[in-house]
């Protein structure tokens, strides 16, 4: 069941600051037990960057400490999307 669909931040054409603490804090406020992360790449290429992968792993570890599961991180591009779980990156 979807509890919420929210924007966590907005950025520039090539960078959006993400604060794992704030992501996990919001999940706690919503009493969520799991989450799916989603963001877009304005370049149109949904290939995950090293920063995308590293930040996802930081969020997963922070969430895990609070019994919150991160099921996936999906990146939206111009002609499709990529799942970090599907790529076995998480």
Image (cartoon, helix red, strand yellow):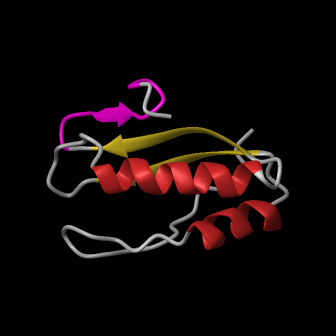
The verdict on residue 45 being magenta is: no
Picture quarter with the N terminus: top right
Q: Position of residue 19 (x, y in %)?
A: 53, 72
Residue 3 visible from this viewpoint: no
Characterize the magenta stretch by its predominant secondary structure. Answer: loop
Which residue is found at the position 71% from the left and 53% from the top? 63
Q: Position of residue 45 (x, y in %)?
A: 17, 44
Q: Nearer the viewer, residue 57 or 1?
A: 57
**Residue 53 falls left or right of residue 28:** left
Q: Quadrant of residue 20?
A: bottom right
The verdict on residue 85 being magenta is: yes
Residue 61 visible from this viewpoint: yes
**Residue 65 falls left or right of residue 59:** right
Q: Position of residue 89 (x, y in %)?
A: 43, 32
**Count of labels in the image:** 0
**Residue 47 falls left or right of residue 27:** left
Q: Quadrant of residue 22?
A: bottom right
Figure check: 89 above or below 74: above
- Looking at the rendering, the stretch of residues picked out in magenta corresponds to 78-87
Figure check: 33 above or below 88: below
Q: Nearer the viewer, residue 81 or 15?
A: 15
Q: Position of residue 24 (x, y in %)?
A: 69, 63
Figure check: 36 above or below 59: above
Which residue is found at the position 85% from the left and 57% from the top? 31
């Amino acid at each position: 069941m979807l509890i919420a669909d929210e924007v966590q931040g907005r950025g520039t054409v090539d960078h959006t600051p993400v604060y794992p603490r704030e992501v996990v804090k919001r999940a706690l406020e919503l009493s969520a037990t799991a989450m799916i992360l989603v963001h877009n790449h304005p370049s149109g290429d949904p290939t995950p960057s090293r920063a995308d992968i590293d930040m996802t792993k930081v969020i997963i570890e922070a969430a895990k400490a609070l019994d919150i599961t991160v099921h996936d991180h999906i990146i939206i591009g111009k002609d499709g999307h990529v799942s970090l779980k599907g790529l076995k990156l998480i």
